[in-house]
Image (cartoon, rainbow, N blue to C red):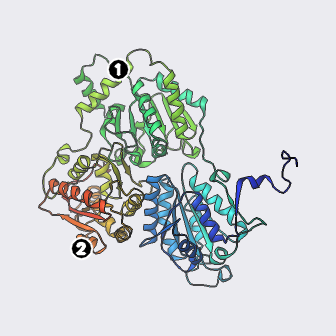
Amino acid sequence: MDRTAPNPILTASDCFVNFQKQLSVSELLLEYLKLEGVSKIFGIPGGAAIFVMNELKKRQNDFQFVICRQETGACYIAHGYSAVTDGLGVVLTTSGPAAANALTGAVNAHTSCAPLLVITGEVPQKYFGQGYLQEGIDARLDIAAVYQNAVQYSAVVSSPDNFTTLFQQALREARSLPNRATHISLPNNVAAAMAPAGPSGTPVPASIETYRASPSGTDLVKVRGAFDDLRQAKRQLIFLGNGSRQALRVPRRLRAFTAFVEKFAFPVMTTPDAKGIFPESHELSLRTYGLCGCPWASIYMGQRDDEFRSLLAKLNLGFEMEPYDALLVLGSDLGELATTVVNKDAYSKLLIPRQSFIQVDLNQSVIGRNFPVTRGIVAEVGATIDELCRLGEHAAPEPGDWIERRRLFIAGIKAEFSPCDRPDWLASEAHPVNPAALMRVLNDEVKKGRIFIDCGNCVGWSLNYLVVDPPVTFHSALAMGPMGFAVGAVIGAKLALPDEPCIAVCGDGAFMMHGAEISTAAQNGAGAIWLVLNDNDLGMVSQGMETLFKSESWLGYYKLGAPDLVKFAEGLGADAVAIAPDQGAEAFRVALRDALKRSLSGKPQVIVAHIDTKPAPPYGWPQLT
């Protein structure tokens, strides 16, 4: 027998698949999820998903179906899980109202560039259009169309014959870069049907590489040009967006990037959503820019002219600083919160440098959208950083003494100006506790772990007063900004990282929106920690309205009924404690240390801090006319 001759029975595609006994569509779906490394699926069961649910029960050794309390919360939990694992978050719900409930969480993941797949069941196709209970595809609700207008990809699997094509596409779209949210609607009759098979059984891909790939390249010529632009400038700046997060999570790359900026003394700032992806205590970090940002970046760029000139005079450096002349933006679409220091100057044109404005993003549609650029580069951020570091490693420092001048100037900014709006609030020991002082205690006590920030005033307090250095990571969802995101997301993070502190900072309004998910954490042994800023109000709205309209006090107009949040949390299975109105930051320190210890047992921990309602974050509200 000629062993070198090709086997006439095999085709090229046979080399890329494994054959299994004939599988149903539900079984094949789980095979794909297993291939993607999915081991936890979040959601709520229901009648239109019974066949997938049945297969999940059979495969409890492979998959944990985490039963959540509401479908939006399930998406937040899956989002938090994916945020700390870099894996795919998967949500399974039934049809109709359940699928609609999941929409907000899916949109939030999509705009946050989190990989999320929402699988919604659907009634059997023979009942389409007949008003079947919870039908999601009729004249009143077309759930696939709703998702098509909200996330990256949405499809109804109409036949076992098109399941593989549509499901693979959902996985491709979710796991490409940037990561996105996708949706699959699966009618019950299709889920129960047998998948197409041949004589050898049902083909299952041998690896994820057979059906998807992620961008991993950059434009070498343009990156060389960008590097030259930076080196030829005198006062340049690197601006990191959330699109750099995944790239800089690679330790090797973060070390190389740090060495790169140190060699050339290139200062680094981040958008609010990217806070902490470059260590904020580093000598070249100017921390965050935009909403409630650190003033250091604005002073460095000369946006605060009086402070800039007084600093130069005080430092007596013996030279004048050249105008701010080059900006390299990596992985930011330069949206409102990233470019607005005060609301009366949205998308501030003061961000535009005198000479070179370089923007790098995989999404070409955002390059030059809000600001004119001199060099736009459509590329993957990680590959771009790698090439910049390679060029920097082989390049000599720029001629003259501008590297040392920048170091001296940046050190002078940091020595002269506080990084936060009110240092006295940060140091406060008053009672009721100042929210800024709560951030000081978090800075002191949390040296590793994950901090999730909800919507509302907790955003402003954390952006301005928290200092985030690896191995601590900061997670927010400011592109969409839904209340309740952190309340759920911290549970997903803790399920993925049971040995790391996982803390949510939220307001009492957001806590009540999705606090029922504490029982999800308790049921699954997730010892997450919630810090609830309790003012019995929607504080950001009240303070904003009072500032904007300069009328009588709005404080208390949006009261929340003064619920006992300690009892609420305890009733859901958490240990809970209150920081009373007559207690200050030290009481919170004691409670936080206790919560960090207790959380190791797997029991949820809630700290309800009654805060001083008068201080407000530095939002820079505009003057209305």
Depth order, front residue of 613/160:
160
Up the image or down, 353 lies above or below 32; here it is above
Identify the residue at horizontal 56%, vertical 76% (top origin): 54
Q: Quadrant of residue 598?
A: bottom left
Of discs 2 and 1, which sits in the foreground? 2
Residue farthest top in this picture: 400
Q: Quadrant of residue 523?
A: bottom left
Q: In 3D space, how far apart are the residues under numbered discs 2 and 1 (Cα atoms)?
A: 58 Å
For the residue marked with disc 1, what is the amino acid? Answer: Glu
Depth order, front residue of 87/56:
56
Query: From where the camera sits, is residue 530 visible?
Result: no
Residue farthest right in this picture: 1
Disc 2 designates what residue? 567
Left or right: residue 548 versus residue 490 is left
Which structural element holds mark 2?
helix
Residue 64 position in % (x across, y down): 48, 67
Identify the residue at horizontal 24%, vertical 35% (top origin): 417
Number of numbered markers: 2
Disc 1 designates what residue? 404
Depth order, front residue of 318/524:
524
Q: Residues within 10 Å of mark 2 (few under 14, many from 20)?
A: some
Which structural element holds mark 1?
helix
Q: Quadrant of residue 481?
A: bottom left
